[in-house]
Image (cartoon, coloured by chain):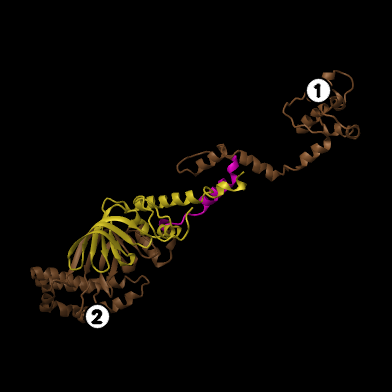
Chain colours: A yellow, B brown
Amino acid sequence: MESQGNEPQPSGHGPAEVTSSLRERTIAENSMVILLQGLQGQVTTVDLKNESTARGRVVNVDAFMNIRLKDVLYRDRKAQLTRLQELFITGRNVRYVHIPDHIDIMKTIESQLAKIHRVRNFASQGGGRKEYTKKTK
Amino acid sequence: MEERERKSAKPDSKETATSSCSRTPSVPEREPEADDAAGDDDADKTDVCSDKFDPLLALYSPTVQVPFPNVKCFNNVSAYESFLRGGRGRAKPENVEKRRLKAMKGVADPERIERLKKLMVNNPTPQSEEGESSGTARRRRQQKPKKNVLTRMPLCKGSPLGELYRCVEERIRVKVHIRTFKGLRGVCSGFVVAFDKFWNMAMVDVDETYREPLLGEAFYHEKALTISRLFEKLKLQESSAGEEPEKKHEARETATKQQPADCTSERGHSRTASKLSDSVKTKHKVSVKAQGPEVCQKKDSQTYGKVHTRHINQLFIRGENVLLVNPQPL
């Protein structure tokens, strides 16, 4: 069905899509990145380590905290404003991510974990492959 | 049952006398339900399904009715034996199975449909008896403890992260020291909602006090920033705006108060050692700074190097930036 150890390519159907890479899924499941993945589609501010900030809509967050934003207002440390259509931030450069006030942190984490759980069980529960072996009868 | 069918078909076909003679004694053995009853109705005797079935009579009678019309006929018993064993179109169990499955290829198998239904999410289907393997597998997986970021939080008990979990559970306000590329940037004071092994933290009700790092010559010359100095600078900033000498005294007091707070912040982080020594040094230097307003004013005239505070309702901190976490004593 899917090859394991896929490079982090988003499947791209929508912000609610869980990554198809098993490795990324497990990393996300066991760390707080999953909270950031739950913010996909929201408008947030990301504070970077270089004292600049980027405010925009979160397109995608991967297991390594790499963040893709769109329609971004980027403010550098000199407070100089720049408008950008797309911005990619390397995970290591993130310092803070502001979480919108209306987001419930625990609920977001739990719903993301449920999504992963669903994807994982669908793929492995004797469905795709075991379906066609002789032993099914 | 099949044997009975084929046996009754034989009267229509010619048999060699020898084979029939040799076979007839064994025929009644093969027919468990056959009765060697003498006399009675001919019809009864030649009826395969009756108690008074006489196989010998049935074999030679021209008027035997076969209960199953579409039965496979054999010329002799050995042909029948050979057919049973498999012969050319060998009826081996696996071949039979293969041929059956092939024949059923296009047909919708209800069992398969049941299996697919079981895969569907949020579809409570009753488990079929056939699915015993998948049933046990699911039970095993349910019994296996789930490991995710939320379940891993309480597992840290006994380690520094376990202390952090205690702060989550008991909703203790913590102060998180944030680092810049070299040294302290500031403090985030708030409640931790969730964390992970990298010290990534989700916090609420955060008051951040920070100073952007100085660069260049200023960086070279400045003394290392500590918590006490940070708040001291903050106070002086506010005071120089209003220019009240009392606030400078307050600053000194708050600076000394910060010291015990820093002392209690030892949570197994080695970096606190350097911070403590720094804060010990500041005890002496604070008074110098308080009495040296001209130095502070010089700092304020520059547009950077100022200490800022802000309030953020919900904040996610990447663990890499955390210097230390200081639970506030109640």
Task: Magenta stretch: give its range.
Answer: B129-150
Figure quadrant of the C terminus of chain B? bottom left
Q: Position of residue B220 (x, y in %)?
A: 22, 81
Residue B294 seen anywhere in this rendered image of the structure: yes
Q: Which mark is residue B281?
A: 2
Q: CA distance from mark 2 to mark 1?
A: 119 Å
Q: Position of residue B181 (x, y in %)?
A: 28, 73
Tell me whether marks 2 and 1 sit on the same chain.
yes
- Magenta span: chief secondary structure: helix
Q: Nearer the viewer, residue A83 or A24?
A: A83
**Badge 2 density bin: few <14, some 14–19, many ≥20, Cα 10 Å:** few
Q: Nearer the viewer, residue B176 or A114?
A: A114
Figure quadrant of the N terminus of chain B? top right
Q: What residue sits 83% from the left and 27% below the top?
A: B11
Q: Is residue B58 above or below residue A123?
A: above
Rendered image quadrant of residue B229: bottom left
Q: What residue sits 9% from the left and 68% below the top?
A: B241
Quickly name the residue at label 1.
B64
